[in-house]
Amino acid sequence: MYQLSFSMSEFLEHYWHKKPTVIKGGFQNFIDPISPEEIAGLSMEEEVDSRFVANLNDKWTAEHGPFSEEKFGDLPESHWQLIVQAANHWHAGCAQLTEAFNSIPNWLFDDLMICYSAIGGGVGPHIDQYDVFIIQGSGKRQWRVGAKDIGQYKETCRASALRQIESFDSIIDEILEPGDILYIPPGFPHEGTTLEPSMSYSVGYRSPKEQELISNFADFVLAHDMGDVHLHDPEFSAQDNNGKIRQRDLENLTQMLKSAFEEKHTVHDFMGCLLSQSRHQLDIVAPEPLWKAEEISQHLSSGGDVQRVSGLKALYHEQDSNVAYINGEIIKVAEEDIAFLKSLCNSVMVDQAQLLSSSAISLLTDLVNKGYWFIEE
């Protein structure tokens, strides 16, 4: 069980989207949830997003996985780093680490990235557009952070798959030891240099960009066959100059565009569907054979539990809690099952402590048979 040594509420008030900071001893007596060998094993899997970055003699190379076992048989002693994205989707210990940050809403959470670095390893100076908590595991790394980007930094590309900047002056220059946390808001340049073989864990939070919202909303409207109407104006009149767009016509067309955004339930469903989808592959496997509702009920009654697939998002709107959005799907329930639906979204486990109606058991069975929740056998 990982527990933060500081108040997240106070942290958010003073630092979130404001300034970077180092929290010494953010985790007391920190123990790595995963070993370097396990990280290497994950990087060999087709489903797992991984990279290997080397920078010996300032010659940068970057490769994407999956990697073969031979890759790790003859590695140099220094200046390389192995990176695994969304490790919380594939490793239970890594998933437990992210639970320490549960007071930040799940719709913002992106993934847990893990880096194993040899001495001198890193990815160079760069700028990210998301919030990140970098937790130092075993070993030591030196971190530098610069002032927020307002156009003063020059981007460079010294290897494919690596976006770097040329240089920056430090406003933070610290050596992180096990349990220390570096928080970096979007837009602040940073660089980590490994002082001794090191493990680090980046808990990332990412909101959609405005252009993503617009683009995805257009896709949502088309997918749900909305807005299939033309302008209707029975008061239309002749005009002298046919190349002119009259102000009245412009306002009518603009109102057509706005009307989709003014449909509250449409926007709510769109946001729920979008925000409940992970950007990284999930370990979703439908069971064989499929479970029956009676079997799920018996399993819970006998003291068993049902677990949500790690990384899968289940969300609901504060003002509309009889509807949940699970991995991009819309789930509606009757009033009697609202508490159960909230529990699905706020907890990763269902057990016998919850008194479930027959309709709740039916819903849970559907979710298990989709591979969204699972029973450890």
Image (cartoon, rainbow, N blue to C red):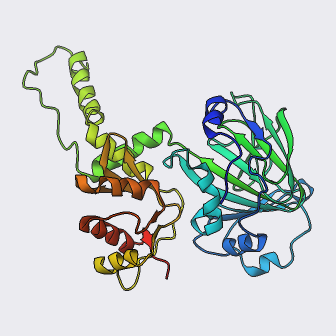
Q: Is residue 92 above or below residue 106?
A: below
| Quarter of image, res 331 | bottom left
Image side of residue 136 versus residue 89, left or right: right
Residue 118 rendering spot, x and y as whole percentages: 86, 62
Q: Nearer the viewer, residue 82 or 142?
A: 142
| Quarter of image, res 189 | top right
Q: Say if residue 142 shows up in the picture.
A: yes
Residue 195 rendering spot, x and y as whole percentages: 91, 54
Farthest-out residue, bottom: 289
Q: Nearer the viewer, residue 360 or 177?
A: 360
The N terminus, quarter of image: bottom right
Q: Is residue 26 above or below residue 299?
A: above
Q: Is residue 319 above or below residue 286?
A: above
Residue 96 rendering spot, x and y as whole percentages: 62, 61
Residue 371 rendering spot, x and y as whole percentages: 42, 72
Image side of residue 263 versus residue 196, left or right: left
Image side of residue 290 versus residue 61, left or right: left
User: Residue at 82% of width from left, 48% of height from top?
Assistant: 192
User: Residue at 86% of width from left, 58% of height from top?
Assistant: 139
Q: Say if residue 333 shows up in the picture.
A: no
| Quarter of image, res 95 | bottom right
